[in-house]
Amino acid sequence: MERAETDAVTDAGTHTFHPYKLLLSCPSGLSLSQFSVVFDEAYDRIPHPDADLENSISEIWNKKIQRNTSLFNGSKFRYGGHILCTADGSSQESHVCLHLGLTDYRTFVGTNLNSLWEKFLVTSEDDSVRCQHTSSPLGNGAIIETSDKKILVLKRSNNVGEFPGHFAFPGGHPEPEEVERECHQREMKLMDSDFITKKVSQEMFDSIIREVVEETGVPVTSLCQPVFIGISRRELNVRPAAFFFIKCALGSNEVRELYSSAQDGFESTQLYTVSMMELENMTSKMPGCHHGGYALYKLMVEAQEGS
């Protein structure tokens, strides 16, 4: 497990910047037993001290819902950092704990997607401090490998809110509502923190399977258990996303046939099954966080080849 930098030095000695930053890389891939979450309001967004900037969040949202009455202000998990844990004193980390708070779509639109999003940032080497005033909802993405060693990539439709027409891995968001629903069913209170923490950790893995099934039409029975490979953040509006690697028992042709019946097929217009080289050529037309997802996958492949 390791961090990766975003900048590279050119021949002239100046720095060029990728469209992403890898906040966390786990090239060995972590299972659910090696993954945990601290879900606490301490990791919620901190309001910005500039009242005008803070008030712009409501102003932007109100304008948006006037133009589109179907917009829904759903709750989202907010990324607030992570802790790496080592096993037996070795240099190879074997456990990660994510720090998650709560945010919502309205605040995401008003901070990260605000045209003034950079004004919400704080100058700091600590990423959680730098982004403490942004919504930073944690998205997710899946690198799915078919039985014939191809990777699934979707072309986003023109009906989506972000990056229409771009290439992307299947994914979306883990959902706080799923955890809340479980609590209601068990008649549990929000103060039952141990149960909630476990449910949030489980939701991180369950949600990516849901997204894959809904967006590709691939049945859950053909998917292996996901492994967590890291977190990428796009530099444009500092949006973070957790990435997972999942093996699929089906071949490319079978997957493409199933795509026509995908539940959320309206979110994309085409599904591609591509080689590693083809995938690399597509990254320039991916959102930065998904470009970073490819970088995480590449680190995993290189680690496997070197072992």
Image: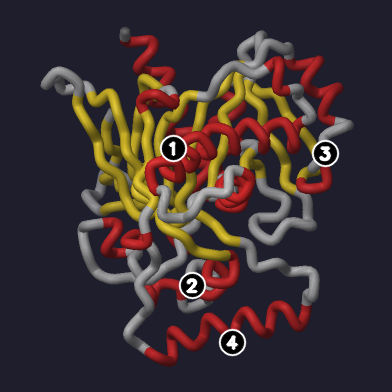
Marks 4/1 in contact by CB < 8 Å: the verdict is no
Which of the two discs, 2 and 1, labels the residue nearer the N terminus? 2
Q: Residues within 10 Å of mark 4 (few under 14, many from 20)?
A: few
Q: For the residues marked 1 and 3, what is the alpha-carbon distance in whole angstroms?
A: 28 Å
Tally the marks: 4
The kind of secondary structure element at disc 2 is loop
Mark 1: amino acid: Lys
Q: Which circle's residue, 1 or 3, is located before the other in the chain? A: 1
166, above or below 224, in the image: below
State the mark number for residue 59.
Answer: 4
Q: Quadrant of residue 284?
A: top right
> Which color scheme did the rendering employ for the protein?
secondary structure
Q: Position of residue 263 (x, y in %)?
A: 82, 39
Q: Earlier in the sequence, mark 4 or mark 3?
A: 4
Tell me the kind of residue under disc 2.
Thr
Could you tell me how far apart the alpha carbons at marks 3 and 2 are, in whole angstroms? 30 Å
- Numbered label attached to residue 111: 2
Q: Is residue 235 visible?
A: no
